[in-house]
Image (cartoon, rainbow, N blue to C red):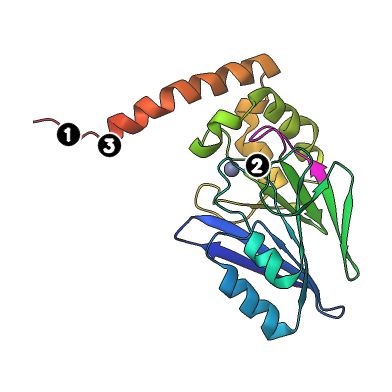
Amino acid sequence: MYFRVIDDARSSAIGYLLADPAAQQAVVVDPPPGQEALIRALLDERGLHLQCVVRTHVHRPDHADPGGLCAHSGACCVVGEGAESGSAVQRVRHDDSLVFGDEVLHVLSTPGHTPHCVSYLWRDRLFCGDVFDVGGCAVGDSESDPALLYDTLTQRVFLLPGETLVFPSHRLKGRTVSTVAEERRRHAQLTGRSRESFVTEMGFRRLVRPHLARALERPAEG
Ligand SMILES: [Zn+2]
């Protein structure tokens, strides 16, 4: 197997290149905008053929559209069912599988951050987009649904084995990798409540956060 993190400091987005080197087949998860040349160089360097560009979620407007990368390589562009995307796409749903060489990506429906978020489970690794950016991703606010996010966390992601490695599409408290067990602990206070309490807390954070951000930007008086 081949696994390469594509961490784009400028956009703070993180993507992942996975491959079966023997079969020379590769998949890219959430390629960060502006990293197409690097991805193409990595593929060329190893003689890999890009099968799919898979995306955990799509925001509106879609600034991260990887249509160029798909068109150049002939790869299919994969999004969750219902997600809007400008590129020619293959839509996937929960329990679908994507095969590259002898490797398999399993699709998990993980809505909440956006209505059509999906995550991809590969071996012991979960590529989960912004599932764990609870109350922290301003760009997702208008599309997020806290009730769905509660179900995704408690009934899907946290049921995976604790040692499952978690790879987000943005840093988690400064880190690029975590585990399901760590995230269970980190969110225990929030997800240990009822679904209704979780929704109320998320609504409160959404209201308070813009005021807090403005207050922090304001120069100190005196
Ligand atoms: Zn997002």
Residue nearest the observer in this picture, 83 or 113: 83
Question: Main structural element of the magenta stretch: helix, strand or loop?
Answer: loop
Number of other residues with Cα within 10 Å of mark 1, as a class: few under 14, some 14 to 19, many 20 or more: few
Judged by depth in the image, the label closer to the viewer, 3 or 2, is 3
* Place of residue 75 in the rendered image (x, y in percent of width and height, measured from the top left): 76, 66
Judged by depth in the image, the label closer to the viewer, 2 or 1, is 1
* Place of residue 168 in the rendered image (x, y in percent of width and height, measured from the top left): 63, 51
Q: Separation of disc 3 and disc 2 at Cα?
A: 30 Å
Q: Is residue 160 magenta?
A: no
* Mark 1 lies on residue: 220
| Outermost residue toward the left in this view | 222
Q: Reading the chain from its start, which is encountered first: label 2 or label 1? A: 2
- Circle 1: residue type: Ala
> Which residue is drawn at the image coordinates 17% and 34% (left, top)?
220
- Report helix, strand or loop for mark 1: loop
Residue 194 in sight from this viewpoint: no
> Which residue is drawn at the image coordinates 79% and 40% (left, top)?
81
Number of other residues with Cα within 10 Å of mark 3, as a class: few under 14, some 14 to 19, many 20 or more: few
> Which residue is drawn at the image coordinates 65% and 37% (left, top)?
185
